[in-house]
Image: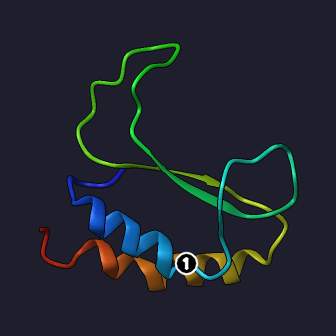
Amino acid sequence: MFHPCSDTQIRDFVDALHHFGIGVSWGGYESLVLPVKPLRGAGTWAEQGQLVRFNIGLKDTESLKADLAAALPFLNTAAE
């Protein structure tokens, strides 16, 4: 979960990722990312802010960490 930020900031963050595709995992080996807004689930969601779901695949861990580090500044830009 991230501190509250705009949908544009989340979109820019996801778009800045190069080693993560956008989508839901069906048990594959790809690294995927998906911004979500929890509406319902097994429990209640009381947190505020955005949620981004990651599926970590078989890519090199250091490459994935570097990709995330390079994209994080997009969440620190001025909100809309």
The residue lying at 23 percent from left, 75 percent from top is 76
Tell me where residue 39 sits by quadrant: top left
Q: Report the label total.
A: 1
Please state, as top left, top right, bottom left or bottom right, where the C terminus lies in the image: bottom left
Q: Which one is nearer the viewer's eye here, 67 or 80?
A: 80
Q: How is the image coloured?
A: rainbow
Image position, residue 67 (x, y; %): 57, 82
User: Quadrant of the rendered structure where residue 64 is?
Assistant: bottom right
- Tell me: 53 left or right of 39: right
Instruction: Give above or below for 44 relative to 63.
Output: above
Q: Residue at x 73, y 74 (%)?
A: 61
Q: Nearer the viewer, residue 66 or 49?
A: 49
The structure residue drawn at horizontal position 33% and vertical position 49%, both measured from the top left corner, is 50
Q: Position of residue 11 (x, y in %)?
A: 39, 67
Q: Secondary structure at mark 1?
A: loop
Q: Position of residue 41 (x, y in %)?
A: 50, 18
* Image: 39 above or below 35: above
Residue where numbered disc 1 is placed = 17
| Residue situated in front as seen by the camera: 59 or 17 | 17
Task: State the residue at coordinates (39%, 39%).
Answer: 37
Using the image, determine if residue 37 lies above or below residue 45: below
Relative side of 54 to 77, left or right = right
Left or right: where does residue 26 sit relative to residue 55?
right
Give the crowd class for mark 1: few <14, some 14-19, many >=20 residues within 10 Å: many
Badge 1 amino acid: Leu
- Residue 39 vertical placement versus 49 (above, below): above
Residue 18, x across and y down, in percent: 62, 82
